[in-house]
Image: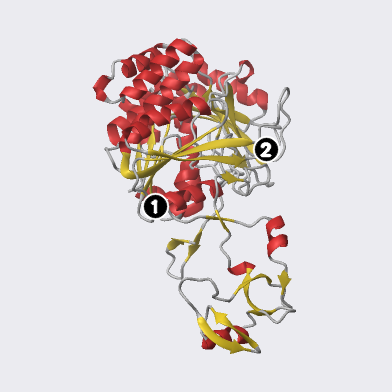
Amino acid sequence: MNKLFYGDNLDIMRRFIPDESVDLCYIDPPFNSKRNYNQIYNNVGLEDAAQAQAFVDTWVWDDAAEYGLSEIKTNEGQRYSLQTFYLIAGLEKTLGRGTLLAYIVSLTRRLNEIRRALKRTGSFYLHCDPTASHYLKLICDTIFVSRGGNILNEIIWQRTNTHNDAGGFGNVHDVIFAYSCSDKRALNKIYQPYTQEYIEQRYKGVDADGRRWMDDNLTAKGLSGGGYDYEYKGKLSLWRVPLEKMIELDKQNRLYFTNKGGIRIKRYLDEMPGLPANDVWTDIFPINSQAKERLGYPTQKPEALLDRIIRASSNEGDTVFDAYCGCGTTAAVAHRLNRKWIGVDITYQSISLILKRLEDTYGKEVIESMELSGVPKDLESARALAEKQDDRTRKEFEKWAILTYSNNRAMINEKKGADKGIDGRAFVLTHTGGAQEILFSAKSGKAQASHVRDLRGTVEREGAAGGILITLASPTSPMIQEAKSAGLIDNQLFTSPPEKIKIVTVEEILSGARFQLPFAFDVVKSAELDVKQSKQGVLFDD
């Protein structure tokens, strides 16, 4: 069964991912870039670049880093190799207890768990950039190579053609380290497309129908396996094919007769798989603003990149794992390639985007057949999420409540001074075909009538159609009265207009309550449908 986990990947791996249960793991973790990354929403005409913080890639030396360092140095649970201990102890002396060591400690603990979860025939791909790739390779060496694994490749992915970096050459590439857990691993032949320069140099022949070809040797001279000795159209030679095959090739217009009387075979470009893939990938283009698969996630990787990795290092039915699954590219590609998959992410914004992407691409059947863990299923778990203090990300309770109630169609809003407590926005249709804004406010603490008044005031000030207040606790009578006094939404599309200010409890959301007004459009770009419908109405992969 496919599985999607919401939570800290270290905790998830230790609790739910058994030893030697994964065939392939790819991760694209934070790069220690010292940046905050925002999710870009569809431009709705109200803001030039509506966005919300997706994740934070800044690190600090805190209690969590201190505990992690202690766990490695004391080898708690006998998890770590001696080489890992020596490396981390040495880096502590070299770097000191600061932001970089905090990042290294965090990745070391998680990489060690990934190696535990991989089968002995498994493979691991670590996507990073030059910011800390040299440290990460050393860590992987101590975790994989010291325990019988191998470094397979350092892959260079050219993610852009031009880049202007002050004080140095333009940084246009990412690094992908490939490791195996042993000498036995899945390895499928992968080909890269020919470059136009290669085609023009090698495939110079063109038939009348436009098919390009290159000519290749047909003689068997010098081959250890021998050949067929006969004359064909005045040319006596030792050929690689028997006479019957030669005649057949001639009828198919697959023979090239040279000016000097030689006979060679045509190798058509459209029948060739390409060049065997090397460790420099220049043929996979990044997600740009016009890309059809673009979802607005800040570090989204192209599906072609994951397609190559998954095809190369796994087979149908294998389990593919991504511990930093972001917007779900690994899961989406693994599903299309008939692999089982497991994904983990620490922000509900990512979980919401993955669920929407999978439903848009493959239909509700995929969501209904997968296991979703870590998402609140009762008041106790919702309250635990609301009271969580150790997340490096913010507003997880608000994100979960708003995105769940809006069926993953709302826009999460980062709190700023002018927002007056507005945590999200959505847009509903009007009778003229336009859009009206709905404002969301989520309260994890004790909600009061003043919160209803504040929401009503913001709705009126911004000219929004209405507002929805989500509360963890049941509303008080003064709150209900205050909400009713706001009246109804002025929208001629509705024969029975809904309340202008609506209070929704977490308990109602957990019971299945969802936003019922018609959305004007998705604020998050939808993934393209990648399924066909049979005559029986059954969805199946392309």
Viewer-nearest residue: 464 or 259: 259
Q: CA distance from mark 2 to mark 1?
A: 35 Å
Viewer-nearest residue: 440 or 120: 120
In the displayed structure, would residue 238 be above or below residue 61?
below
Left or right of 120? Residue 238 is right
In the displayed structure, would residue 349 be above or below residue 96?
below
Viewer-nearest residue: 21 or 91: 91
Q: The residue tagged with tag 1: helix, strand or loop?
A: loop
Viewer-nearest residue: 197 or 437: 197
Left or right of 89? Residue 161 is right
Displayed quadrant of residue 275: bottom right
Task: Tell me residue 520's x, y (percent).
Answer: 61, 44
Residue at mark 1: 339
**Circle on res. 133:** none
Task: Tell me residue 227's x, y (percent).
Answer: 50, 79
Residue farthest toward the front in the current orientation of the protein: 222
Question: Is label 2 in contact with label 1 (beta carbons under 8 Å)?
Answer: no
Left or right of 50? Residue 450 is left
Amino acid at the residue labelled 1: Arg
Work out whether residue 79 can be spotted. Answer: yes
Residue at mark 2: 43
Q: Mark 2 vs mark 1: which is more N-terminal?
A: 2
Q: Nearer the viewer, mark 2 or mark 1?
A: 1
